[in-house]
Amino acid sequence: MVRPYTITRGRTAPERDDLTLITVLTTAEEEAEAALTRGSRAGARALQPEHRLILDRCRRPAAVAEVAAGLDLPVSVTKILLGDLVAQGLLKARAPLSVARAAGGVDLGLLTAVREGLRRL
């Protein structure tokens, strides 16, 4: 087991403070592929195994909470790793509402059905 302190290289807080639990992340395919295959300093030295797992997991859009659960790491540690990848241009972070708008808008009927279902629980 690797301690989170080691994974984050001693950092205790992310450089970005805009990553919330529901921020949607997507791998920037071309940039990530180039960084993983070229073996340059930016690709080989900077990417840890956890970074590679995140890039693989985010090939399909995923929320910060989902990524943290998949890595089995605390959210605070995951946010630091995500911030690294966003800063390198290997990962795209979007607020969930902007993603919904880009997909054609928010379906209020669906949201109402979910809310009513949750109330019945």
Image: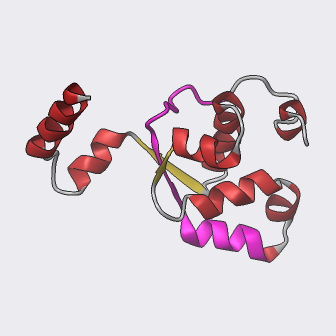
Residue 84 position within the rendered picture, expressed as x and y whole percent measured from the top left: 70, 44
Residue 121 position within the rendered picture, expressed as x and y whole percent measured from the top left: 27, 29
- Locate the N terminus by quadrant: top right
Is 72 left or right of 38, judged from the image as shown? Answer: left
Is 114 situated above or below 88?
above
Residue sitting nearer the eye, 33 or 77: 77
Quadrant hosting residue 32: bottom right
Residue that appears at 23% across and 57% down: 103
Give the magenta range: 15-37
Residue 94 position within the rendered picture, expressed as x and y whole percent measured from the top left: 42, 44
Residue positioned most to the front: 121
Residue that appears at 49% across and 32% down: 21
Residue sitting nearer the eye, 41 or 108: 108
Q: Is residue 47 visible?
A: no
Q: Is residue 68 magenta?
A: no
Q: How many marks?
A: 0
Is 41 left or right of 93, judged from the image as shown? Answer: right
Residue that appears at 73% across and 53% down: 51
Quadrant hosting residue 3: top right
Residue sitting nearer the eye, 58 or 73: 73
Quadrant hosting residue 52: bottom right
Q: Is residue 67 visible?
A: yes
